Amino acid sequence: MQPTTLAQILVNGPSKGPAVIGDSPDLALTYEDLIDQTERLAGRMRAAGLQAGDPVAVVLPNGPAFVTIILALMRAGLVAAPFNSSFTTNELRTLLNDLQPRAIIVDDTSAAVVHGAAGTDVPVWTVSVDASGVVSVSGLAQSSRRVPESPAPDDPALLLYTSGTTGLPKGVPLCHANVLRSALGIAAHYALTPADRSLVVVPMHHGHGLIGATLSTLVSGGAVVAPPRFSASQFWTQFRKHEVTWYTAVPTVHQVLLLRADGDGAPDHGARFIRSCSAELATTVRQKVEQRFGAPVVVAYGMTEAAHQVASNPLPPRERKAGTVGFATGVEIGIIDEAGARLGPQRTGEVVVHGPTVMRGYRNNPAATAAAFSNGWLRTGDIGVLDDDGYLALIGRIKDMINRGGEKISPTEIDNVLLSDPDVADAATFGVPDSKYGEEVWAAVVLRGDTDAAALQALSRSQLAAFKVPSVIRIVPAIPKNPMGKVDRRALAAMFVS
């Protein structure tokens, strides 16, 4: 039976098989358990006076409780708005002021949420999980009523917030059909089955962790292994213990696991595949991950406004093209010029997306919504090019492109050259103001071996046109990144330019 809404997302799960496996503490919820719990909690939420379409903030770490609460909210016809559990009081207050939730669901460590909600009459409900995996929510009456019929496909299900790198975070409403089509498409693209187990190491409050890793696994009948947070030292222990078959992560996680692999006794086989998304994965890093861990790495491309995945390289034996994020999955991808005209293959321009997973618009932000669409297509803000086979290569963010004397330079291209040096652990290129050229090319690198700025400039000159070679290369202890692992080039430039 094919589900039509997220309220029915568990229908393909084996009734006795594990659905969500916790770690710290160890516990497992079967599909039967998860269905029973979501029905019970959904009834109690509606009995508490919440109405269909009401938004509810969820501030929980990854784990069985997070999954159970999100599914219960969806089953009740409510709108789940997951927040980063590490946010400060001020950050949470900003989001709560925008969301205006009817309730806030937290764990017992969320003091910041309590302070953030101070002065409001919004109830704060606390989640606990007993040794058998039963999820309870204090503040909800123990009595419940029969849950109404499942919501419709076009009813709102999730409200995810963008990272806000260009200003305040924007709310992205996604309906049941948006999210379900995305999860089903991801499961189909990677041929997920009940035999698969995903180790979730990215936050579930983002589309990558919630849709890309968790819901895609559940719609396939597989099991989600959900520790509260990513721990590099525990990763391979968890991987072996729970017989994990795949994981998806941002490039930073892959690089950390690669650096620690020998010391941690990482296996050289066992994963069916490894997925990378949410930021650029350098080709050299992808190759090293494949060689060390003995599994194909598939690079994907996603965005919150399109319910996560919009493109991905395929699994073998189909061709995985280096330097690309694969072809469209469940949507159409186009390229447009500055006037909004569609461009053909091999032409560079802005990437646009159209399809059933795309949001209708930002929450309470008509100006941002108008700017986000061009002739009905979602503008991604990314510069890219499609080849003749439909594979998409990303060149960089429009806002990150460096304009040196009229030459438009992609920082990603230079990053990849610097990362090809085995003594470089991480690298990021950025533009700085220059009186002669308008902008000049600078780069920052994190070293793990014996090289220096002069050697890296020589490497750049051997592979890049002269105007692309960084005029300055700074050695730094770390590259600033946002919570999803994307380089924050503006913050990087601010470190050196006052």
Image (cartoon, helix red, strand yellow):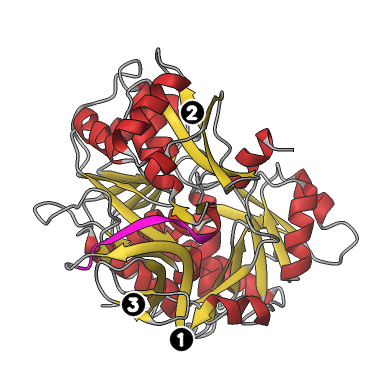
Report whether residue 490 is seen: yes
**From the viewer's perspective, is 22 left or right of 12?**
right
Quadrant occupied by the N terminus? bottom left
Viewer-nearest of labels 2 and 3? 2
Residue hosting label 2: 445
Q: Which residue is located at x 86 percent, y 67 percent?
A: 121
Residue hosting label 1: 376
Q: Which residue is located at x 82 percent, y 58 percent?
A: 117
Q: Secondary structure at mark 2?
A: strand
Q: Which residue is located at x 24 percent, y 71 percent?
A: 345
Q: Position of residue 106 (x, y in %)?
A: 68, 52
Viewer-nearest of labels 2 and 1? 2
Disc 1 residue crowd, few under 14, some 14–19, many 20+, Cα 10 Å? few
Residue hosting label 3: 3
Choose between 302 and 466: the one closer to the eye: 466
Disc 3 residue crowd, few under 14, some 14–19, many 20+, Cα 10 Å? some
Q: Position of residue 461 (x, y in %)?
A: 35, 32
**From the viewer's perspective, is 17 left or right of 143?**
left
The type of residue carrying mark 3 is Pro
Q: Position of residue 250 (x, y in %)?
A: 42, 44
Quadrant occupied by the C terminus? top right
Mark 2 vs mark 1, CA separation in Å: 40 Å
